[in-house]
Image: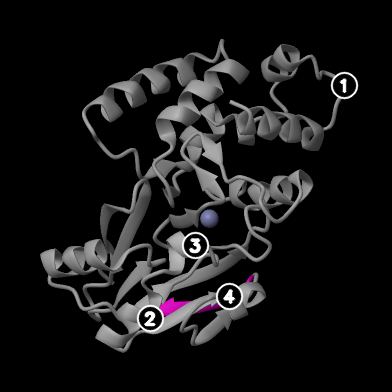
Amino acid sequence: MSALEIEVFSCRSDNYGVLVHDPDTGLTASIDAPEEAPILAAAERRGWKITHIFTTHHHIDHVEANLALKEKFGLEIIGPVNEALAIPGLDRTVADGDEFTFGEHLVRVIETPGHTAGHICYHFPDDKILFAADTLFALGCGRLLERTPTDMWHSLQKLAVLPDETAIYFGHEYTLSNARFALTIDPDNERLKTRAAQVEADRAEGKFTIPTMMSLEKETNPFLRPSDPAIRRNLLMEGKTNEEVFAEIRKRKDNF
Ligand SMILES: [Zn+2]
């Protein structure tokens, strides 16, 4: 079984487009469909024919090109059962724990309500790849538009148990703002300081910060670290639960 090939490109103002290609079968999945032209350009660049869209959630900046791409390629659109009515062109619904194959590559569905009520992530366990869309970002997490901080905290816990060496592809380039915010929550974290400096340099050159790695997020992403004693001291929340600390961090980011 050959390794999957991945093409990452920017779409809209700050979305990432991602194409996943299985060289053994020629299958190609677009992770969400933010914008038609850049997706077509990426497929053309690599010489790939798009066969699937793996939809993570219903927001327009993730589904807008669904129908156009379906018309062009006759592809199959897979998406979350809990948002089925809001996803254009949906062919097949999936729910938490569902497994299917992409060529010979196993795909596992993880429901992560929080940003939206039915948001799902696509995990390729054997390839150690996670498509986290708007649930987990580099140094951040999605805004809580449809669910509570407690729901999102539980969703992030489902991702945090994945192996440290999992590569994480996310939906938006928010990493610079996330890094600056993270330093206000966890100012003495040496690993974070080093990473934030790297992000500043990379973004100044227009470099992508995708993908990230689970181990790095666990060490530096404040939304995965509410149990950290230094963060709790800094927030004056030493006696609180992880959920309460997480909710406070999320609230501060909303106002950052
Ligand atoms: Zn979204």
Residue at horizontal 28 percent and vertical 22 percent from the top: 201
Q: Residue flagged by tag 2: what amino acid is it?
A: Leu
Whether residue 186 appears in this view of the structure is: no
User: Where does label 1 land, which residue?
Assistant: 239
Residue farthest toward the top in the current orientation of the protein = 188
Q: Mark 2 falls on what kind of element? A: helix
Q: Mark 4 — residue?
A: 86
Say what amino acid the circle numbered 4 marks.
Ala
Q: Which residue is mark 2?
A: 67
Q: Nearer the viewer, residue 109 or 246?
A: 246
Pick whichever of labels 3 and 2 is earlier in the sequence: 2
For the question of whether residue 172 can be seen, the reply is yes
The N terminus lies in quadrant: bottom left
Closer mark to the observer between disc 1 and disc 4: 4
Label 4 – label 2 distance at C-alpha: 13 Å
Determine the CA span between mark 1 and mark 2: 50 Å
Colour basis:
one colour
Image quadrant where one finds the C terminus: top right
Q: Which numbered dot is residue 111?
A: none
